[in-house]
Image (tube, rainbow, N blue to C red):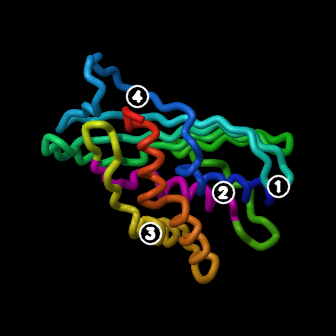
Amino acid sequence: MKRILYLLLLSCLFIGVIATESCQSSKNSTATKMLKFNFEKGKGYDYEMTMNMDQEIMGQKMKMDMSTYYSMDVVEDDGDIKTVTSTYDRFKMNMGVAGMNIEVDSDKPLPNFGTDEDGNDPMKMLNGLLGAIKGRQFTMKINAEGKVLEVTGFQDMAKSIVDSLGVEGAKGQQMIEQFNQQFNEESIKDQFERVLYIFP
């Protein structure tokens, strides 16, 4: 059980780096004839990124369906480049591993299963991780083709999230490094370009 819970925690840390298989806007938008990134200043857009995957981690087969919900607000538009503030709104994940099915939803905290033999509470840590990421913001600069030119806002996010979990010392530093490898300007830029960049 401990191994499965840590697999779940590890999977949540890598939410932002797995290839996005589908992306859909949850708000209706008017049809346009021009192929360009046409978000309007002052408007907000909700995005849901959905990923479905089958993989094997540490000898365990795992099936995972994951959805990440973002709110995107256009705060500046200079004609060529739009500045978009994006907020992590919600994470949902359904994972099947070792005959067990685990559902994770940042809007519905997981029940406490108690502590492991080391005195750690994996569910408390996972709930804390999801709660710490939810509501975090980053900013993107996007051109008319939908190419993400710049992403900012991740510099202090990892430390802030790890601090909120109460993880200290070497373990905390390791979590910060893992977070920074996966949640950084370049990985988010690549992830959103798959969705927003219109032309090859």
Residue holding disc 1: 1
The Cα atoms of the two marked residues, 3 and 1, are separated by: 28 Å
Residue appearing at x 36%, y 54% in the figure: 137
Q: Is residue 80 left or right of residue 199?
A: left
- The x and y percentages for residue 169 are 59, 83
- The x and y percentages for residue 180 are 51, 66
What is the secondary structure assignment of the residue under circle 1?
Answer: loop
Residue holding disc 4: 25
The Cα atoms of the two marked residues, 1 and 2, are separated by: 12 Å
The Cα atoms of the two marked residues, 3 and 2, are separated by: 17 Å
- The x and y percentages for residue 189 are 41, 51
Work out whether residue 177 or residue 193 is closer to the camera in this orientation and state it: 193
Residue appearing at x 77%, y 43% in the figure: 62
- Image depth: mark 3 or mark 1 in front: 3
Disc nearer the start of the sequence (1/4): 1
Disc nearer the start of the sequence (3/2): 2
Q: Is residue 1 left or right of residue 34?
A: right
Looking at the image, is 7 positioned above or below residue 24? below
Q: Is residue 81 left or right of residue 169?
A: left
Check disc 3 and give the amino acid type: Ser
Disc nearer the start of the sequence (3/4): 4
Residue holding disc 2: 9
- Image depth: mark 1 or mark 2 in front: 2
Looking at the image, is 81 positioned above or below residue 198? below
Would you call the spot at circle 1 few (<14 residues within 10 Å), some (14-19), or many (20 or more)? few
The residue segment tinted magenta is 121-141
Residue holding disc 3: 160
Work out whether residue 32 or residue 29 is closer to the camera in this orientation and state it: 32
